């Protein structure tokens, strides 16, 4: 199994070098950036499993960067900060952070938080994939229902007879029922607008 790839972002170059070296010694693949702009360039060029972000940086804050990394690359974040104010921690959680650690951080003590965040990131990605599949299935179901209604109206059939007719047509054409129903709905729309 490949080592998890981490994107580490901190404007404090000493902290960045120390954490990078320590995490690599523990077997993680680490790409380091000392600015949000550098992090966005790295994320556009490489795939990462998790971002470790300093919260307070010049330019874009770590939370703003986390939002962009999530939106553009589906990359989840773990926050690092020299400050542990309750309001900042709460905001990090609201922004979707998978953890919040107060610096200075010993790389060896960071490992449990990284592993937990990686597991949560995999869970979130699985949920997002399931959501997409469900939305697709619901859309297919709506088109199937509409196609059944169209066949009922056009051919004067009952609901079950219209469904059987659509299913039989799809089988004869060696197509999925959902694809056939999508075409029936699209044909009606074309006829209405054409």
Image (cartoon, grey):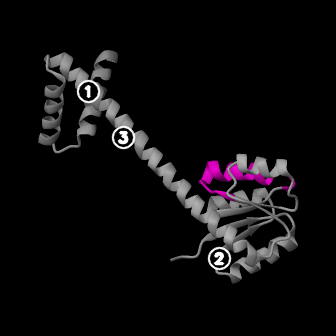
- Helix, strand or loop at label 1? It is helix
Please rate how many residues cluster around mark 1, counting C-alpha atoms within 10 Å: few if below 14, some from 14 to 19, many from 20: many
Give above or below for 144 relative to 156: below
Q: Position of residue 82 (x, y in %)?
A: 87, 62
* Residue shown at the point (53%, 57%) measured from the top left: 123
- Helix, strand or loop at label 3? It is helix
* Labelled disc at residue 137: 3
* Labelled disc at residue 28: 2
The part of the chain drawn in magenta is 56-77
Label 3 or label 1, whichever lies nearer to me, is 3
Residue 98 among magenta residues: no
* Labelled disc at residue 147: 1
Mark positioned earlier in the residue sequence (2 or 3): 2
* Residue shown at the point (29%, 25%) measured from the top left: 146
Kindly report the distance in space between the C-alpha atoms of the residues bearing marks 2 and 3: 38 Å
The residue lying toward the viewer, choosing from 90 and 57, is 90
* Labelled disc at residue 10: none
Q: Quadrant of residue 5?
A: bottom right
Q: Position of residue 50 (x, y in %)?
A: 64, 63
Kindly report the distance in space between the C-alpha atoms of the residues bearing marks 3 and 1: 15 Å
Q: Are marks 2 and 1 in contact (CB under 8 Å)?
A: no
Please rate how many residues cluster around mark 3, counting C-alpha atoms within 10 Å: few if below 14, some from 14 to 19, many from 20: few
């Amino acid at each position: 199994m490949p080592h998890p790839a981490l994107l580490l972002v901190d404007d404090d170059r000493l902290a960045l070098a120390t954490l990078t070296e320590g995490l690599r010694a523990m077997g993680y693949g680490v790409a380091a950036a000392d600015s949000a702009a550098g992090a966005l360039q790295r994320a556009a060029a490489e795939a990462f499993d998790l971002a470790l972000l300093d919260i307070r940086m010049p330019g874009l804050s770590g939370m703003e960067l986390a939002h962009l990394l999530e939106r553009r690359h589906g990359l989840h974040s773990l926050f690092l900060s020299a400050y542990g104010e309750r309001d900042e921690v709460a905001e990090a959680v609201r922004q979707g952070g998978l953890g919040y650690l107060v610096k200075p951080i010993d790389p060896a003590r960071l490992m449990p938080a990284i592993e937990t965040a990686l597991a949560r990131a995999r869970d979130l990605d699985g949920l997002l994939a399931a959501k997409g599949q469900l939305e697709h299935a619901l859309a297919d179901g709506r088109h199937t229902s509409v196609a059944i209604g169209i066949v009922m109206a056009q051919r004067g059939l009952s609901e079950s007879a219209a469904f059987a007719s659509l299913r039989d047509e799809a089988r004869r054409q060696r197509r999925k029922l959902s694809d056939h129903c999508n075409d029936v709905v699209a044909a009606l729309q074309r006829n209405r607008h054409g």
